[in-house]
Image: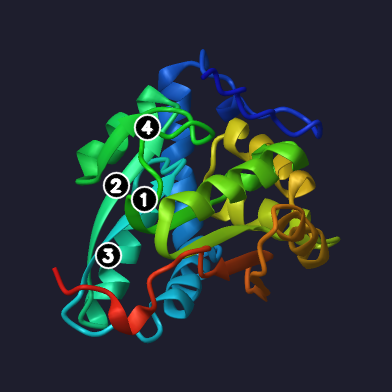
């Protein structure tokens, strides 16, 4: 069966949307995004979502974590460090459409396959946790809904969505931070487009509802949104097998 590719957001364009973009520029942008995640709330948003989905999971448990659109692999590694502090071992797996990003993720220590998040080469309920960070704003609303349903089918224990929250002061805050960290002009331009593509908390809730998912949605510092839910047919946290 042929799966229709995910459609991009109709709001603006970003270099990282283009599979044929210059590899050197892609690598530089991804390195800057890694720094942005560290300083501007991306990693903190993921940790907050993990705290919610790991609540009740016994210490000593080993879980698989699938990161769709993993970029340079910094966020699944941050997730591993966070879970370790709770006595939980995560085995991260990345999925990336970009071969440049996949190579960077592998170099950082994350097992990564090259594939589209809309058609992951995985069976239903084949991973414990699914993470999607800063990918949803790249997609048209209908494709975001489709991706949420895919996450729900794949995950056994929980799903974490972390993305950008659209706000009036977000562009100014990003300009100041990006210049302070010396981001290149392409990353700066793409970041401003990403902010325009971001969602409000209400819009994200509506997309989840359209996907048939009853999830929690909350705001986080750095103009971030986090959504979490237990997938349909999920394994109760206390019953997760200690591998």
In percent of width and height, residue 27 lies at 40, 30
In percent of width and height, residue 238 lies at 32, 84
Residues marked 1 and 2 touching at CB (< 8 Å)? yes
Q: Earlier in the sequence, mark 4 or mark 1?
A: 1
Label 4 to label 3: alpha-carbon separation: 23 Å
Quarter where residue 130 is shown: bottom left
111 or 209, which is in the foreground? 209
Q: Earlier in the sequence, mark 4 or mark 3?
A: 3
Q: Earlier in the sequence, mark 4 or mark 2?
A: 2
- Residue drawn where x is 29% and y is 47% of the image: 93
205 or 199, which is in the foreground? 205
Q: Earlier in the sequence, mark 3 or mark 1?
A: 1
3 or 196, which is in the foreground? 3
- Residue drawn where x is 50% and y is 71% of the image: 49
Circle 2 sits on which residue?
93
Report whether residue 166 is seen: no
In percent of width and height, residue 182 lies at 52, 46
Circle 3 sits on which residue?
80
Q: Nearer the viewer, mark 4 or mark 1?
A: 4
Question: Of the numbered discs in the image, which one, if any, rests on residue 121?
Answer: 4
Q: Nearer the viewer, mark 4 or mark 2?
A: 4
Circle 1 sits on which residue?
66
Report whether residue 11 is seen: yes
């Amino acid at each position: 069966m042929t799966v229709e590719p995910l459609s991009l957001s109709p709001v603006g364009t970003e270099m990282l949307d283009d599979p044929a973009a210059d590899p050197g520029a892609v690598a530089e942008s991804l390195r800057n995004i890694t720094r942005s995640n560290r300083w501007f709330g991306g990693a903190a948003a993921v940790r907050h979502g993990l705290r919610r989905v790991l609540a009740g999971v016994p210490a000593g448990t080993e879980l698989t974590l699938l990161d769709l659109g993993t970029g340079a692999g910094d966020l699944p590694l941050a997730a591993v460090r966070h879970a370790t502090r709770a006595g939980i071992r995560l085995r991260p797996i990345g999925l990336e459409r970009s071969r440049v990003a996949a190579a960077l993720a592998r170099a950082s220590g994350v097992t990564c396959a090259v594939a589209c998040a809309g058609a992951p080469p995985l069976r239903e309920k084949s991973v414990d946790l699914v993470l999607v960070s800063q990918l949803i704003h790249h997609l048209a609303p209908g494709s975001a809904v489709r991706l949420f349903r895919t996450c729900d089918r794949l995950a056994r224990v929980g799903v974490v969505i972390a993305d950008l929250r659209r706000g009036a002061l977000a562009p100014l805050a990003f300009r100041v931070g990006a210049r302070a960290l010396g981001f290149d002009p392409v990353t700066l331009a793409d970041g401003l487009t990403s902010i325009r593509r971001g969602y409000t908390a209400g819009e994200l809730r509506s997309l989840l509802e359209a996907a048939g998912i009853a999830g929690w949605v909350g705001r986080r510092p750095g103009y971030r949104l986090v959504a979490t839910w237990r997938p349909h047919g999920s394994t109760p946290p206390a019953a997760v097998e200690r591998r």
